[in-house]
Image (cartoon, rainbow, N blue to C red):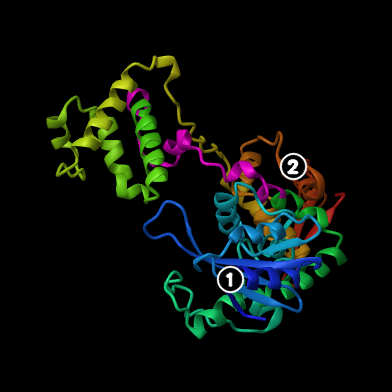
Amino acid sequence: MEKVIISNNELINNLRLIEHEDYIAIDTEFIRDTTYFSKLCLIQVASKKHNFIIDPLAAGLDISLFWNVLKNNSILKIFHSGRQDLEIFYNIFGKLPSPIYDTQIAAMVCGYGDQISYEHLVFDLLGIKIDKSSRVSNWSYRPLSNKQISYALSDVTHLVNLYEILEKKISANNRENWIEEDITNLSNIANYKLKPDEAWKKIKFKSFKGESMNRLKLLAEWRENLSINRNVTKNKIARDEVLIEIASHDPKNINDFKRIRGLKLDNNKKTIDEILLILEKAREIPKELWPVKNIPKKNKINQPAVLELLKVLLKHVSEENKVAPKLIAKQIDLENIASGQKNDLKLFQGWRYEIFGGLVENLIEGKIAIKIQNGKLLIIKNI
């Protein structure tokens, strides 16, 4: 069968070869240098016996034919760090593939760190070194080189083997439910829906509130919608610092814009007129409806040694159970505990409680001690 699919007949024939598989591996190549949405350039697919590349840029190719596989509930779709791949499929089809599996999440459960790369995982588990020299290729340029094709296929041909090894490790340790939460979150369609009205929350700024925040929210929403409609980067419309300057100075006419740094006035009257209308709209919004950005307060930790002790305990549990620390508890969780807050934390529920949360409670209550014996940290229980 053809390795690079450029016609509908080729695609149909290749899809027939995987339609009865229990699981397949999927990866994509894309570019996003000048556009809001990623431009899908390749889709790589592999099963245990067959692999191929779909060229979505080929003239006349109906990419929707591939959706029949993506939506097939009897086929598990395997990704590695698949969030961007899933976002691309959502933007194309308006839906997400199902069911899915992510080997990066699975690797966390097996003790391979918080965000191990595909390249390193392949080397650690299979002893194979992947040539990454084609990683930054212009994937939209045709024809593809043999080196590009080889690289693209290597991103999925090993993924099936990784899945089988990791799944076996997880099953042997009865940890299937340890990855459910993260896989479920990855599959949550709400994570991929466009939310222009929340774009302001992603802008970093200091000492910004009240009327200025209200203006910034509307400006950010305007920029987001314009970027989406034109499919250009947000910086192509206006950089964050420009929006912050406009929101801060609240210009009333075109001359006032001369005070705004980074905003080019040449041939930009239409844009300025739009911004003036937005600012006028902002003035009509009552104070009680102004947005408030909730910046998490830094926990006041009177005894930093307590936090460090919790970190030591987490690292010990992580090493003993061969699972990434981040999957058990995050820094903010430890800070909350160190500052005397422990309500509604996930580490006091389910499997996290069994391996770590229970130890934390016992540590707080003085029921365990930590000692070093022969250069190894040991937990003494029931003291």
Q: Amino acid at mark 2?
A: Ile
Discs 1, 2 touching: Cβ within 8 Å? no
Q: Secondary structure at mark 1?
A: loop
Rendered image: mark on residue 7? 1
Image coordinates for residue 66, horizontal then vertical, percent: 65, 61
| Residue 224 position (above or below residue 280) | below
Q: Residue at x 44, y 18 (%)?
A: 289
- Separation of residues labelled 1 and 2 (CA atoms): 65 Å
The residue at the point 81 percent across, 53 percent down is 177
Label 2: few (<14), some (14–19) or many (≥20) C-alpha neighbours in 10 Å: few
Q: Which mark is residue 364?
A: 2
**Three-letter amino acid code at the position of disc 1:** Ser
Q: Is residue 244 left or right of residue 73?
A: left
* Relative depth, front residue between 270 and 308: 270
SS for tag 2?
helix
Q: Earlier in the sequence, mark 1 or mark 2?
A: 1
The residue depicted at 70 percent of the width and 57 percent of the height is 68
**Magenta residues?**
184-212
Front position among marks 1 and 2:
1
Task: Judge whether 345 appears above or below 171 on screen.
Answer: above
Is any part of residue 112 visible from this angle? no
